Amino acid sequence: MRIDRSSSKSDSLTIIQPSSGWNIVDFKELKDYRDLFYFLVWRDIKTLYAQTIMGFSWAIIQPLVQIVLFTIIFGKIARLSTDGIPYILFSTVAIIPWTYMSQAMSNSSQSLIQGSNMLGKIYFPRLLFPITPVLSKLVDFGISLLIVLCLLLYYRVSPTWNLLFLPLFLIMMMSIPTAIGLWLSSLAIRFRDVKQVMPFFIQMLMYSAPIVYSASSIPESFRLLYSLNPIVGVIEGLRACLLGTPMPWMYIWPGMVAAVFLLISGALYFKRMERIVVDVI
Amino acid sequence: MHDSNIAIKVENISKCYRIGMKENMHDTFGHTILDCLKSPLKNYRKYRSLYNFDDIHPDQDNIPSDVVWAVRDISFEVEKGEVVGIIGVNGAGKSTLLKILSKITVPTSGRVTIRGRISSLLEVGTGFHPELTGRENVYLNGTILGMRKKEIDRKFDEIVDFSGIEKFIETPVKRYSSGMRVRLAFAVAAYLEPEILLIDEVLAVGDARFQKKCLDKMQDVGRQGRTVLFVSHNMPAVTRLCPRTILLNGGRVQVDDLSHRVVSSYMHSEKGTKAERIWHDMMGAPGDEVVRLCSVRVRTKDGRITESVDISQPVKIEMEYEVLQPGYELRVYYHAINEEGIEAFLSIDTDPTWLKKPRPIGRFVSNSWIPGNLLSEGTYFIGPGIYTVNPHEKRFRVSDAVAIHVIDSMDGNGARVNFVGNLSGVVRPLLKWETIFAPSGNSVATETMIGEANS
């Protein structure tokens, strides 16, 4: 039954052994699985609003309701200071990215547990699971940007050179749910407490960032500590990009450093937990 | 890196799991409260320790009670193009071994070297999403199994054709019947083209006809020079598809040999029936004061005692018994019953030498030949018995005294020709066939009859 084949394809060599210590992410392997990654993201997008009446309109309705609520409560009733920007505009440019980040990070943190059945049946780089929501949620984000666009047109905010920084802040915006997702998804496989903590963790994150209020209302002495939260930098940066206000770099740099640190440490921790995920989950 | 002809090299693989940690029982409410307060710390330690085996080695015997060895010190090599079966009782470590080889889980110790592109099939339809259409699931499932998108594009029509559900390919899978879902999932799996394929008992699902189709396809896989590791409980399938089989027991390799030998020894250890049975103690032997059974054995045509026999070869059933009282006319017989409990036949000794004659005291041996190409594949249990004719009385009947494993090595000369699926039926005779060609479209049957009448 044996047939000798030309060994053109047979050069792939796999070695399986108990690995210990801290490994770095295997980018070559990720590249090999890029088709799977594509279909996983696509499955997420395709099935998100399956069998709903409103379909992708939900991507607009959800943040819109929040914007209206916040504008009434914090803008009209509490009258928070917004450095002279109309409150609805001020809060919208923050709520849209925040909605993206919070949804992506909570999906990401549950991704391994929800996919545990698949993890036990087939091998693929486990990293694909927590980073899938980070990409698939971008669709919602893109759609809900329409709200921002409408408001910018309505208030006749003209684009400035600050807009050039947009890609930078979008990348930073994506890195946050990635980092938190890596950490929490790998913690959650052993400690299901993560799921219980998630709702108020997200709530706390929201109030820790200048989403409903302005960063300038934080006392100067706490500014560095405050801006170590990378969400602060993302929100302030995006606000400056879109509204053309001066770029508040002092809020952004600490957050960038923190985001990079979180991302690298998350990836390392995830790699360490990845190999035991099937046995422990 | 020395031997490039080895596809899979497994060296001293072990894997342990920490199972069910003891939960304390509380007898008073106070204890329960106290424990609730203490439990976060305890739980933290417990869940942390779920995967910590630093203090455990496969060769040590005094392991903690909550640690089990699923696979222990397994080593073997599989050459390129070899098709190897893996059998064993539940919990023998088959699935764990396959999970280690397919990189799903990491061994606690040891090392595996795999040369070539590998795919594993532990389940069909992994990742199927009910909301997606058949087409979308084919792509999703295909990429999960390790195919590239381009590859699926190329094979898509064949896959759909194989599944036989062209009409519903654009329907969400949640509207499918479970059978349709399985067929679609199988179709994707059948078109995997890795160099090394690991298959768990996935063939247990699906209707019989479809299973056959898949086995055919799998056999193709073997023919194409692919390395296959096949975990199964289906012994005829294992002997048919895999020339070599590894028997696992308690996480270790018990036997690693030619399939028919391994399957025989497995069936033997499972059912306790072998090719020879001898009653040394005359008083404990089956029978009564008239006649007692001494031994039963299965022999090949060259006289060897054997547990397994090729489907094309005859086999001899040998019954030895002692007549203790003279003057009785005996009928010696046996039943042959297959694994499912279906009786293949009952055979009575028809040798005229002693057929209708009273027998003297002494030893007799009755031999019977089961011809080749009679029984189909599988295990047959031989249940011998003797009764006296006058008075008509059963002297003994032993069920499952010995067993024969009929195996089909598929050399293409047998009754199955080169069909690889499961052939049904208790018997598989090699009948005489005649096929006549009638070029003009005349009735062949009439012509033959005339021809035969003339000759």
Image: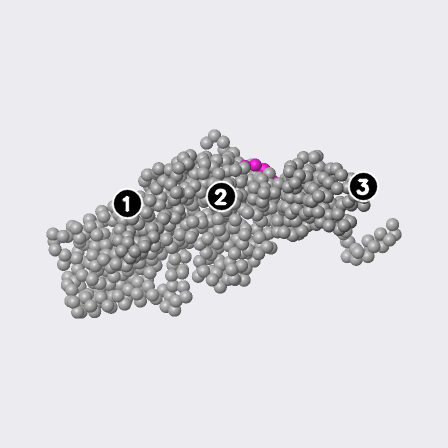
Residue at numbered disc 2:
B92
Residue type marked 2: Ala
| Numbered circle sitting on residue A265 | 1
Would you say residue A149 sits in the magenta stretch?
no
Any part of residue A91 in sight: yes
Q: Going by the image, does A58 lie left or right of B201?
A: left
Kindly report the secondary structure that dominates the magenta region of the rendered protein.
strand
| Numbered circle sitting on residue A255 | none
Mark 3 and mark 1: Cα distance apart in space? 90 Å
Which residue is drawn at the image coordinates 64% and 37% (left, top)? B280
Residue B28: x and y, percent? 30, 56
Residue type marked 3: Thr
Q: Going by the image, does A224 lie left or right of A31?
A: left
Mark 1 neighbour class, 10 Å CA radius: few under 14, some 14 to 19, many 20 or more: some
Of marks 3 and 2, which one's residue comes earlier in the chain? 2
Segment tinted magenta in the rendering: B256-260
Q: Are marks 3 and 2 on the same chain?
A: yes
Q: How is the image coloured?
A: one colour
Residue at numbered disc 3:
B353
